Image (cartoon, coloured by chain):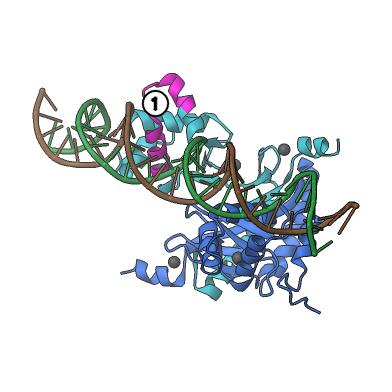
Chain colours: A cyan, B blue, C brown, D green
Amino acid sequence: MPRGDGTGPPGWRGRFRGCGHRFTIPRQAIIETLEKTSAHLSAEDIYLKVHTQYPNIGLTTVYRTLEVLAQMRLISKFDFGDGRARYELTKNSKKEHHHHLVCTNCNRIIDYTDFIDEEVELLNKTEKALSKKFNFEISNHLIQFYGLCEKCKKGESV
Amino acid sequence: MPRGDGTGPPGWRGRFRGCGHRFTIPRQAIIETLEKTSAHLSAEDIYLKVHTQYPNIGLTTVYRTLEVLAQMRLISKFDFGDGRARYELTKNSKKEHHHHLVCTNCNRIIDYTDFIDEEVELLNKTEKALSKKFNFEISNHLIQFYGLCEKCKKGESV
DNA sequence: CGCTTAATGATAATGGTTTTCATTATCAAG
DNA sequence: CTTGATAATGAAAACCATTATCATTAAGCG
Ligand SMILES: [Mn+2]
Ligand SMILES: [Mn+2]
Ligand SMILES: [Zn+2]
Ligand SMILES: [Zn+2]
């Protein structure tokens, strides 16, 4: 059963305490913002959203919280080529591990999980082979496809 | 037969002219620097190397040339997480298309092409499926594995 | 309720990249 | 080989996302 005390069902407070971190209002607010969206927010995006409800939470704190969350592996940090880092909860209610399509024209990001089945298999195989060959301990991977989204593909032919 | 006039065997001048660009000394020097290395150089890396032979070529020009080269698809631009963009010739004598292992501890980059055969197959399949499903025109992809290199794996257990 | 100290926030600093603008040099035309 | 239009260059300043500083606040433990 959910707590209803603002610490959220999955026990954010517990996770923070478990890593020796304090669970503060700003951290709670930032996580709630990330939970509410399915977008890929930048630090400033998050700051602005949080700001409407907690006008005294600073951008610096957003950056610091994101760093802690990333280090705890609770969020993923991405570079989609628009000059700022973007973040999303690693396990959102709606999202599990997925990869991205990035529109090089309008910077739209599309999540996909649909065709991952065979990918997962090949990824495991590849990771195993690479680990052995280079004696490299793989802990994570990044897969992104770049191109033109539906909208931009149309606009291109004008 | 190679020209021997400094424009290089693959006809760099021709490629530039073909895109309506002029072929200048700085551009030539930057390309030669990229041809000579198998590393993943930053703009400043390139600037410093070029600087030893042409001390009056500026960092700004390096950035601008890299932008042109990237737009012409002759170089690839990467973000390995160390806060600066890194570049490499798309088709080097030694390298064709390849993917990267990135050490999250010492930032070492390992190129690999070895296990790509099955990857290529799956990638084509995936790209086709994604294109259809999202009506997205895929023109490029990025695949990187993160973890600890041989050296850093050892150091970790100390 | 206090105490310890991690966390915060306003501000300044950092550093990679981009802009500006006056000057130079490429290269097509004559 | 000139010449001229203009793309390219370089020094300097501007930009802007991110980080460091430091005095202040508050989380969590006893
Ligand atoms: Mn996503
Ligand atoms: Mn490479
Ligand atoms: Zn688009
Ligand atoms: Zn390493």
**Residue A125, quarter of the rendered image:** bottom right
Q: Inspect the magenta stretch and tell me whether residue A51 lies in it.
A: yes
Which of these two is toward me, B54 or A58? B54
Provide the chain ID for the residue under circle 1.
A
**Residue C24, quarter of the rendered image:** bottom right
Residue drawn at (73%, 64%), measured in percent from left and top? B120
Residue B68 is left or right of residue C5, and the answer is right
Give the image location of residue A50, x and y in percent.
45, 26
Residue A89 is left or right of residue A4, and the answer is right
Q: Is residue A2 visible?
A: no
Give the image location of residue B18, x and y in percent.
82, 57
Total marks placed: 1
Give the image location of residue A96, x and y in percent.
57, 44
In the rendered image of this protein, does residue B40 appear above or below residue C21? below
Residue drawn at (77%, 37%), measured in percent from left and top? A152
Which of these two is toward me, A104 or C1? A104
Which of these two is toward me, B150 or A151? A151
The magenta span reads A48-68
Identify the image quadrant of the N terminus of chain A.
top left
Residue drawn at (69%, 57%), measured in percent from left and top? A118
Q: Inspect the magenta stretch and tell me whether residue A55 lies in it.
A: yes
Give the SS element for disc 1. Answer: loop
In the rendered image of this protein, does residue A32 appear above or below residue C14? above
In the rendered image of this protein, does residue B6 appear above or below residue A118? below
Task: Using a 10 Å C-alpha cutoff, classify the residue at mark 1 as few (fewer than 14 neighbours), some (14 to 19) or many (20 or more).
Answer: some
Residue B50 is left or right of residue A116, and the answer is left
Residue drawn at (47%, 55%), measured in percent from left and top? B82
Callout 1, which amino acid?
Gly
Does mark 1 have its CB less than 8 Å from ligand 1? no
Figure quarter occupied by ligand 2: bottom right
| Residue that mark 1 sits on | A6
Q: Is residue B34 visible?
A: yes
